[in-house]
Image (cartoon, coloured by chain):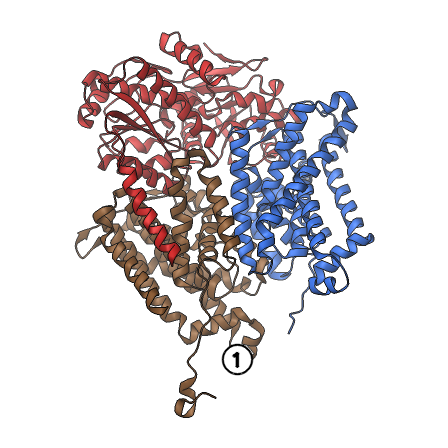
Chain colours: A red, B blue, C brown
């Protein structure tokens, strides 16, 4: 009994404690998976935003105030994400960056919309997120249909006639696989294999054996880099030389580490351009600063995309000299054109989607480097 | 037909690992009737410790591949075993006299602690074992290419099971373990130090799990902090399938589970693979309620 | 002693009723989350706490309820709250079908079978079984509930709805605990063979407890679907079932107040640790172990039932 009373007492105290945050900073929220299976993504998102915020503060801050990043953990789970969103929306933030998974983002969209907080998602590529007409929702990552289109085009360019498609039953990978499948079938390219693996396992030999017997010219894997690395490695151990193509979730240096340089060589993937491949001074400075502060280059393209989310928010606040959500949303929708992002030029359409050709095709060379294909 | 045998070897390789982890589950269960949900995370710790020792001590260079590896396995087993003993002393020992499910919740708490501790120490990113420690030789069995390391893993788990079985059945200490598993009170009356038996069980069980973690690291190369949860669940399934508390049962259950998964993926559906495995498990338990090799326990009145 | 307990209960009710006055939206949402899990915990308590069955797959029934609500409300436009009995029924019937052959399994064997059950259900949902579950995307656009003509969408409105349901649940299960059915279950848990010998039809009672718990979890599924407006398979993983299990055992299995306290600890505690960022779950896990070590029976174990036997004696004289 005493424990329960104590517990409630603490609950009430903490509720008040939360509200007494200082008011003379511009607060920008970050919602990401800081724990759980996607923790490495969330933690790197935090690193990127901390770095960029420091940079803004050293250069005079924003409209006369300092920028403050408030990070909340969504653990990659819809229920916890909705709590994180409620928490952030009571903390007086102007805008929020995040989050990674599409269904996780979806669980929070209404909460931010009702609180009139600008949300810029960084890894949520499901098409429907921007089809709801939400005024304050944006995303720096392209949509699945765009990537599906580029993927299908790449497969056609490589001249494959029989294609195996493998996804991992996450909404992102499944969406991409479905898009690509529909487009390829329209062009009379036969899909000889279409299945889903279980992410998080180690041994995919059974799947590769089955896939091999369907004799594809090429394999399109739409899942994430840990599985892609294992697939490449186990494929070459089997002595099977089929070309693999991956989606943007395979864009991670750990892919090569897991697969080994020899097995990873010749792997193609689609992604927004890496900062190291952009000539813009912003991208160069970012890569250099990140390397300096964390002693390693940025790994995840989604973390870099969260950085772009932060940068467009900062740009909007600077240009409008206000933190009014309507003004900011209006600016992002209409006035922000060809903003020099860390992943190429950024503009948004009325739905909040990023406009323009974003995707590039990369190939892994014999040294494990990601080489931009012309 | 060739594909069938290929899938069979795929299943055996996965099953060998499951079996090794299941052995630890079953040993702890046999003596304490405790489902040690943290066992999967001890497996993870084994994989991470193995990586640290491997990269920091360069054993292979000074001792050669075979002896270097042997020493590495022993060190990992020893360290994980110690962690297992500590885990028991801290999280399970105070709960010996309380309802069984209390210890299960404590085990779940320990699982969360281990998982997050590994994340905080090593970072959330995937860690990768250095490649080409083991020679990548592929041998042909009946015209079928099988990587040598896969056979080695299966052999190693069968060897460990055999050693454990011999230890339990033929040595004096093993007899004490069996006595404690049968009836702790009576064992105590016979002059067996049950606490020491439990400590020993918590040394051996996690050590086997740690060895399995090291093998997974060496073979698949990629490890991360959440991997123990899936492997732990699979191993628990395997232990139950074979009849929990029974050492040959864990081995049979593990290998069977691996084979069911591979064949289910090959001939039914990859996406439904785990569901198929659980479905088969449920069917088996309906007809053999104590698993394949589990003893039928008469209810005591 | 008894009065002291009632004072705490009364304070707790007053706290909940007045919470919107001094708690912000975030803490109200935490309370809502706790409320949902409290009902789930109470429904599992019927199976684990009273029935003594090791059941770690409760999320399967919760998922079936939530998906029933989501599918029917989005495709036929039926008001969400009306679907509560139907969702419960679907979950209950499913439980009846699957539990019949497995109910006789002993402790840990039943445990793995129920884990298998929740995994099979989740895999089926992800693979878009029958083409109605929406696969990994789940189902979105579930309408908000309306009650007596009021649309419920604000946090404090949900607070009253959810905790109202908790109150109904507590009332119902309290009556159940003291009924013939409840006593039979407790007997069965304490000593199955003696219960069987005394004429309690154990298999039937166990099955009834299982189905009742599943029915209730299915109804909570409706509340969850209405609250989130989107549901997807990752909300119904095996780990969810583990959480309910921890709520029941940590709080005090077999005790209503204990289970509600358990929901506060298991769901509330990680929220308190938000400030610790990456250390959040580590602290939570450690807290679980420590609470379990110090209160080995759960924090509020059920009190020994004292049945008033005096009315069976002539004149009420002590023997």
B164 lies left or right of A344:
right
From the viewer's side, name the closer residue of A171 and A207.
A171
From the viewer's side, name the closer residue of A340 and B207.
B207
- Residue C249: percent from the left, percent from the top? 48, 57
Which residue is the site of mark 1?
Answer: C199
From the viewer's side, name the closer residue of A103 and A184.
A103
- Look at 52% across and 29% down and name the residue there: B123
- Look at 21% across and 23% down and name the residue there: A328
C188 lies left or right of B21:
left
Residue B108 visible within the image: yes
A14 lies left or right of A320:
right
When the figure is inspected, residue A222 is found, relative to residue C92, above or below; the finding is: above
Residue A243 visible within the image: no
Position of the C terminus of chain A by quadrant: top left
Chain bearing mark 1:
C
Answer few, some or many: residues within 10 Å of disc 1's Cα (few below 14, many 20 plus, some between 14 and 19).
few
When asked about the image quadrant of residue B183, the answer is bottom right
Q: What is the tally of numbered marks visible in this picture?
A: 1
- Residue B171: percent from the left, percent from the top? 82, 52
Position of the N terminus of chain A by quadrant: bottom left
- Look at 40% across and 26% down and name the residue there: A46
- Residue C157: percent from the left, percent from the top? 23, 50
When the figure is inspected, residue B41 is found, relative to residue B71, above or below; the finding is: below
When the figure is inspected, residue C12 is found, relative to residue B115, above or below; the finding is: below
- Residue C54: percent from the left, percent from the top? 53, 59
């Amino acid at each position: 009994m005493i424990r329960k009373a104590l517990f409630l007492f603490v609950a009430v105290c903490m509720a008040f404690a939360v509200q007494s945050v200082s008011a003379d900073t511009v607060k920008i929220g970050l919602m990401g998976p800081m724990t759980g299976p996607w923790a490495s993504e969330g933690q790197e998102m935090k690193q990127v935003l901390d770095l960029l915020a420091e940079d803004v503060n050293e250069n005079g801050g924003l409209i006369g105030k300092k920028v403050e990043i408030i990070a909340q953990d969504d653990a990659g789970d819809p229920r916890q994400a909705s709590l994180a969103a409620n928490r952030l929306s009571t903390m007086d933030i102007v805008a929020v960056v995040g989050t990674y998974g599409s269904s996780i983002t979806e669980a929070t969209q209404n909460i931010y919309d009702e609180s009139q907080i600008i949300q810029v998602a960084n890894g949520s590529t499901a098409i429907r997120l921007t089809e709801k007409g939400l005024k304050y929702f944006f995303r720096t990552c392209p949509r699945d249909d765009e990537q599906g289109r580029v993927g299908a085009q790449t497969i056609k360019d490589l001249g494959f006639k029989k294609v195996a498609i493998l996804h991992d039953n996450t909404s992102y990978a499944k969406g991409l696989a479905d898009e690509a499948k529909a487009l390829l079938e329209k062009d009379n390219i036969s899909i000889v294999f279409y299945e889903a693996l279980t992410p998080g396992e180690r041994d995919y030999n059974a799947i590769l054996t089955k896939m091999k017997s369907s004799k594809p010219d090429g394999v399109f894997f739409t899942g994430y880099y840990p599985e892609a690395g294992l697939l490449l490695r186990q494929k070459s151990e089997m002595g099977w030389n089929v070309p693999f193509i991956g989606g943007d979730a395979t864009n991670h240096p750990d892919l090569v580490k897991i697969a080994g340089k020899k097995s990873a060589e010749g792997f193609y993937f689609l992604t927004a351009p890496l900062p190291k491949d952009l000539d813009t001074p912003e991208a160069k400075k970012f890569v250099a600063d990140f390397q300096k502060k964390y002693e390693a280059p940025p790994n995840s393209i989604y973390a870099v995309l969260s950085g772009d989310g932060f940068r467009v928010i900062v740009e909007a606040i600077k240009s409008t000299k206000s933190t009014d959500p309507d003004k900011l949303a209006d600016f992002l929708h209409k006035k922000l054109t060809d903003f020099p992002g860390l992943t190429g030029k950024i503009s948004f359409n009325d739905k909040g989607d990023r406009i323009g050709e974003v995707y590039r095709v990369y190939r892994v060379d014999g040294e494990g480097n990601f080489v931009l294909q012309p | 037909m060739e594909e069938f045998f290929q899938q069979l070897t795929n299943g055996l390789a996965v099953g060998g690992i499951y079996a090794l982890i299941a052995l630890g589950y079953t040993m702890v269960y046999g003596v304490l009737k405790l489902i040690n949900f943290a066992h999967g995370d001890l497996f993870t710790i084994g994989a991470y410790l193995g990586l640290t020792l491997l990269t920091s001590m360069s054993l292979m260079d000074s001792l050669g591949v075979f002896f270097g590896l042997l020493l590495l396995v022993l060190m990992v087993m020893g360290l994980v075993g110690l962690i297992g003993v500590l885990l028991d002393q801290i999280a399970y020992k105070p709960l010996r006299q309380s309802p069984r499910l209390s210890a299960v919740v404590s085990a779940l708490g320990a699982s969360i602690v281990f998982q997050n501790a590994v994340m905080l120490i090593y970072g959330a990113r995937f860690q990768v074992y250095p490649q080409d420690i083991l020679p990548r030789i592929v041998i042909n069995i009946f015209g079928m290419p099988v990587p040598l390391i896969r056979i080695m893993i299966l052999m190693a788990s069968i060897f460990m099971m055999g050693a454990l079985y011999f230890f339990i059945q033929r040595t004096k200490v093993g007899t004490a373990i069996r006595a404690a598993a049968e009836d702790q009170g009576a064992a105590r009356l016979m002059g067996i130090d049950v606490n020491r038996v439990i400590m020993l069980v918590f040394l051996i069980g996690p050590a086997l799990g740690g060895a399995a973690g090291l093998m997974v690291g060496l073979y698949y190369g990629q490890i991360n902090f959440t991997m123990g949860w899936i492997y732990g669940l699979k191993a628990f399934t395997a232990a139950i399938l074979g009849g929990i508390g029974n050492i040959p049962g864990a081995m049979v259950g593990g290998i069977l589970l691996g084979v069911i998964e591979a064949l289910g993926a090959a001939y039914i559906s990859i996406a439904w693979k785990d569901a198929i495995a659980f479905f088969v498990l449920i069917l088996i338990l309906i007809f053999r309620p104590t698993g394949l090799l589990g003893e039928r326990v008469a209810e005591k009145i | 002693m008894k009065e002291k307990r009632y004072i705490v209960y009364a304070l707790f009710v007053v706290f909940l009723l007045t919470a919107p006055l001094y708690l912000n939206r975030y803490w109200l949402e935490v309370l809502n989350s706790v409320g949902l899990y409290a009902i789930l915990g109470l429904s599992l308590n019927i199976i684990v706490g009273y029935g003594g069955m090791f059941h770690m797959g409760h999320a399967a029934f919760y998922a079936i309820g939530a998906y029933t609500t989501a599918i029917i409300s989005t495709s036929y436009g039926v008001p969400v709250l009306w679907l509560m009995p139907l969702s419960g029924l679907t979950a209950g019937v499913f439980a009846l079908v699957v539990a019949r052959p497995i109910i006789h399994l002993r402790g840990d064997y039943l445990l793995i079978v129920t884990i298998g059950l929740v995994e099979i259900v989740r895999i089926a949902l992800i693979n878009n079984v029958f083409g109605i579950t929406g696969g990994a995307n789940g189902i979105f656009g579930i309408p908000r509930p309306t009650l007596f003509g009021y649309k419920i969408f604000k946090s404090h409105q949900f607070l009253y709805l959810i905790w109202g349901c908790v109150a109904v649940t507590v009332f119902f299960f309290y009556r159940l605990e003291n009924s013939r059915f409840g006593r039979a279950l407790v007997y069965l848990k304490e000593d199955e063979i003696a219960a069987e010998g005394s004429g309690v039809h154990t298999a039937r009672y166990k099955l009834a407890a299982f189905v009742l718990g599943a029915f209730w979890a299915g109804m909570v599924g409706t509340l969850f679907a209405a609250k989130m407006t989107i549901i997807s398979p990752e909300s119904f993983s095996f780990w969810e079932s583990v959480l309910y299990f921890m709520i029941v055992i940590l709080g005090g299995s077999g005790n209503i107040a204990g289970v509600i306290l358990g929901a506060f600890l298991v769901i509330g505690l990680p929220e308190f640790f938000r400030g610790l960022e990456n250390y959040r779950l580590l602290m939570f896990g450690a807290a679980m172990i420590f609470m379990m070590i110090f209160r080995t029976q759960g924090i509020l174990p059920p009190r020994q039932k004292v049945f008033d036997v005096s009315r069976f004696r002539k004149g009420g004289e002590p023997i």
